[in-house]
Image (cartoon, rainbow, N blue to C red):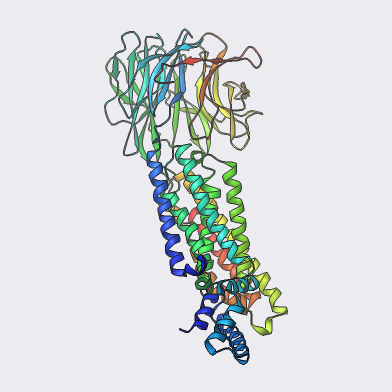
Amino acid sequence: MNWGDFMTLKFKNIIFISGLTLLFLILWGISLLADTPQGYSGLGATTDLSPDDQVIAFSYYHDGDASLYTVPVTGGRAELLAEPEEGTSYINPVFSPDGKNIAFIKQWDENEEPFGELMMINIENESIDELTSEGNHVTDAAFAPNGKELYLLQSSVYENYSPIASEHPHGFDIFHLDLKTNQIEQLTNEDAYEMSDIAVTPDGEQIMYHSYRDDDILAFYSLESEMENAFVPKGADLKESIISSPALADDGERVVFSGVAGEDGNYIYEGFIVDLNTKEAKKVTSFNEHVTSPVFFNHQNKLLVTVDENFAGAEPANGYWIIDLDKEDSRQWVEIKMSEKES
Amino acid sequence: MNKVNKYVNQALEQIQSPTEEREDIREELLSHIYEAKKHFMTEGFSEKKAEDKALEDFGKANNIGKDLQEAMYPFQRSFLYIIGIAMIVYGVLFYLNATFNLQEIIPSWLAIQFAFGGAVTLCAINISFVGRHFYVLHLVMFLTLMWNGFNFMVVEPLPAYGNNVFFWIYLAITILIGIIFIFTNSYYSTDIPKHKAKNGKTAIIISYFLNLILGMMLITFSLFLTWVILIFGGFTWPLVIPLIPVVVWLIFYKLQMRLIAKKPIISIFTGLLVAVLPLGVIYLLFSL
């Protein structure tokens, strides 16, 4: 009698099912020994330049939590400015016009719902003030040119507007914060689907932000007339009407943003500058990667951009680059050395 | 049960024939064995010895069954073994890669992958049972194809799982073998009436081909919709919606299998109706 004869059908079934179950349990057991996901570690996307163009403020994520750092614009060792408690991130830093303070968003999740409070740190003594009270959804902030006021974006709901959409912050409006009295006043009643990347024009009369109404738009809200003026940037190199992370130049006449310049399976985003008089957008970077969160230098015709070399990947691979707009294809990598813990 | 019946049953365990065909084969085998037994008895062997000699002459029951299976349903059982084992191996490789290279521990995915791979392999082992229940085999294969399609279109392209070319090619080959199996097995499983044996056969083949193409188009569309919902909405209840037309189609296909054999031309139109109607309902649901 050979093995085949000995193996009755019932026996074969039992052996197979038991073997497969055992294999499953072994694999499951092995995976319990593997490193558990730690969360993203690396540079954050958003940056800001000090008023004298000498220092970059940025977030660095360690196991999913972002701390605030500064580094000389020429690169070098990063300096830790503020480290949050576990499960919290400090993001979207913005220098005050006098360069003494940095406003930023303290962000954390509760039951998968993101919360955001506006904070401010004094660079010299590293004291941190909480400018909004607990339980808000502040996403972004910008200093007024006088440095005594801040304008912020805040969402009122965190939900999905469509059953096939995931939950996101919605119901956005612009708020005004007086740093002297700490009084917050709601300026708009837009209840907007989306608002982001707030900025104040150099004359302090208009608020610029990015929103979405069938298309991505750049909007300017007049503080005096309380009217909004919006447009969709156009340009030969702009392949889709998708724009993100716009930032205003110090002259108040140009906006730099990240836009779609092509496709290689994923969209390729490059930096574009739109002239606010002609509304024409022109491509100013050629990374063939994902260029995001560009900011203008304050006294030079340069840009600081974030380039994600792993766009649409599991985790971003961000690096900061300086683009000289007066020279063709001029780019310089900002080499940042983190302390041993981060790197 | 006497030795001969036991021998025949063992041979029949290797064959996927439906009940009627199985009984015919049983009778055929029995008559051949008894004839051989008679022959050996005339040569002077005792009844018991003649029976042993006849069975010995026939060869091993398993081999007889396997030969008959290959003659009547070529490659069908091998396809099942290949798909089932390929899925189990894929499960092991993908899970280990996700665990150690991507730090993504997904035991629930592995459990589903093993359940499908295991179900297909069990179909191969128990070919005589599933042969008597063609619809069960179809259902297992369609659901397996859907799961592999889900892995191909939804899981594998997710950035978190690496977008790995090797896994993609592996899946594509497994899916291709699955599609070939479904087409060939549908045809083999058709109980073609004798009067349709010549002209009707072509119509039946065409009808099967078109019906299965429609079903696969419906499944592909459902998977695409699942992918869209998953990308934009994550794991939410609307994920159930794309599954509804597939479930309707799978239930309908049980009836359709009979209709294809009897009225192949009409069944093309009913197949078209049942494949297109749910798409229209989904379109209306989302446009409201």
| Corner quadrant of residue A165 | top left
Q: How many labels were placed on the picture?
A: 0
- The residue located at (55%, 85%) in the rendering is B49
Q: Is residue A220 above or below residue B29?
A: above
Q: Is residue A265 above or below residue B92?
A: above
* Image coords of residue A104 (percent x, y): 37, 21
| Residue farthest along the right direction in this orientation | B199
* Image coords of residue B188 (percent x, y): 62, 72
- The residue located at (43%, 49%) in the rendering is A163
* Image coords of residue A196 (percent x, y): 44, 29
Please tell me which residue lies in front, A94 or A5: A5
Please tell me which residue lies in front, A214 or B188: B188
| Residue farthest along the front direction in this orientation | B44
* Image coords of residue B142 (percent x, y): 53, 62
- The residue located at (62%, 56%) in the rendering is B176
Please tell me which residue lies in front, A91 or A177: A91
Q: Is residue A105 above or below residue B279?
A: above
Residue A163 can be seen, yes or no: yes
Residue B283 can be seen, yes or no: no
* Quarter in which the C terminus of chain A is drawn: top left
Please tell me which residue lies in front, B212 or A172: B212
**In screen coordinates, is A315 left or right of A331?**
left
**In screen coordinates, is A66 left or right of B179?**
left
